[in-house]
Image (cartoon, coloured by chain):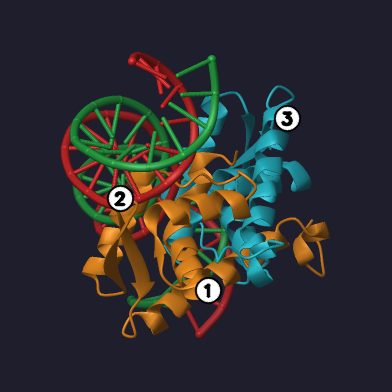
Chain colours: A orange, B cyan, C green, D red
Amino acid sequence: MASNDLLKGMLKPIILKLLFEKGPMYGYEITQLVKEISAGEIELTFGALYPILHKLEQEGIVQTESEVINNRNRIYYSITPKGNSLAQEKIAELEEFVKTLKIFFKPNFGLKFSHA
Amino acid sequence: MASNDLLKGMLKPIILKLLFEKGPMYGYEITQLVKEISAGEIELTFGALYPILHKLEQEGIVQTESEVINNRNRIYYSITPKGNSLAQEKIAELEEFVKTLKIFFKPNFGLKFSHA
DNA sequence: AAATATATATAAGTATCTTATATATAAACA
DNA sequence: TGTTTATATATAAGATACTTATATATATTT
C-alpha cells in the first residue's frame, strides 16, 4: 500500500473527483471505489473520510440525501451547484500537480540543460 | 502554484530523488532546482527543507560536507551508502503513487465495468 | 543606499491524516 | 447456534509534516 504520508491533501480532491464523475455516492461506497480504482494502493479510512465529507457539506460544496436500504441508513453525498466550480478547481489542481510530479521521473527532469 | 496541502509527504522523496540523480547538493540549490523543474509549481520553503535534511542526516540516510564559497558556507548533502537502498525505496514508492493518482483521471477510472 | 540574491537555521502554529473506539444490521460460515 | 465478516456512519485523541515568521550574514545589482 502507498505510504500514508503521500496521501495528505490528496483525499479531498480525490473524493470530489469521484462525486463529480459518478454523481451521488455514500461514504462506504466511496472507500470501496477508491480501493478498487487504486488496486488497494490507497486505503481511505473512515476517520479521514467522514470529517472531510462533513466539512465539505458544512462549506456548502456537497449536499446530502438520506435513504434507508436493508434497514441500514445510507447518506448520499453529491456536489452542489454552488460547489461545482470549486470542485472542478480542486480537481484540476490535483491533475496539474500529478503532471508536475511526473516531471521528476523524466530523464534529466525534463530540463533542456543540466546544471553542472 | 500548487496547493500547499498536496505537497505533504512528497518533499522528502522528491529531495531524495534529486540527491540520487544529481549527487551532492546544497540546500539552497535544492530549492532552486525544485522550482525550476516544477516550473514554479512547487516551492520548497526553507522551513520545510532544512528540518527534512537534518532528519535525514540524523537517520544516516544522507551525509554532509561543508565548503566555503565566496565567504559563504555551503553544506553539501549526499546519500550515504547505507541510505541508498532506503532512498531508492522511497523514490519508487513516490513513482508508484504518482501512477496510482493518474488512474483517477483516466476514463471510467481505468475500470473495465462501471458500478451502477 | 537600498533591494535582491545567496546561504543556513529554528520555533510557533496549522491542518490533515492515523488509530482507536462506538454503535448497529445483514450475511456468511462453522 | 454462535462467530466472523461485510455493511454503514460517527467522533476523539494523537502524530507529524508542513507554513509562516523570524534570525543571521555576505555578495550583487540597481
* Nearer mark to the viewer, of 2 and 3: 2
**Mark 1: which secondary structure?**
helix
Residue at the location (53% across, 75% down)?
Answer: A92
Q: CA distance from mark 2 to mark 3?
A: 51 Å
How far from the left and from the top, in percent, is residue D13? Answer: 19, 31
Q: Which chain does the residue under circle 1 lie in?
A: A
Going by the numbered disc 1, the residue's amino acid type is Glu
Going by the numbered disc 3, the residue's amino acid type is Asn
The answer to whether mark 2 and mark 3 are in CB contact below 8 A is no
The answer to whether dots 1 and 2 both sit on one chain is: yes
User: Callout 3 environment at 10 Å: few (<14), some (14 to 19), or many (20+)?
Assistant: some
B27 sits left or right of A110 in the view: left
How far from the left and from the top, in percent, is residue A45? Answer: 42, 43
The residue at which mark 2 appears reads as A72
Q: Is residue A28 visible?
A: yes
Q: Which chain does the residue under circle 3 lie in?
A: B
Please tell me whether residue A116 is drawn above or below residue C29 in the rendered image.
Answer: below
Rendered image: mark on residue B84: 3
User: Callout 1 environment at 10 Å: few (<14), some (14 to 19), or many (20+)?
Assistant: few
Q: Is residue B72 visible?
A: no
Q: CA distance from mark 3 to mark 1?
A: 41 Å
Q: Which chain does the residue under circle 2 lie in?
A: A
Residue at the location (60% across, 38% down)?
Answer: A1
**Mark 2: which secondary structure?**
strand
The residue at which mark 1 appears reads as A21
Going by the numbered disc 2, the residue's amino acid type is Arg
* Nearer mark to the viewer, of 3 and 1: 1
Please tell me whether residue A91 is drawn above or below residue D30 in the rendered image.
Answer: above
Q: How many marks?
A: 3
How far from the left and from the top, in percent, is residue A81? Answer: 34, 85
Please tell me whether residue C16 is drawn above or below residue B82 in the rendered image.
Answer: below
Q: CA distance from mark 1 to mark 2?
A: 25 Å
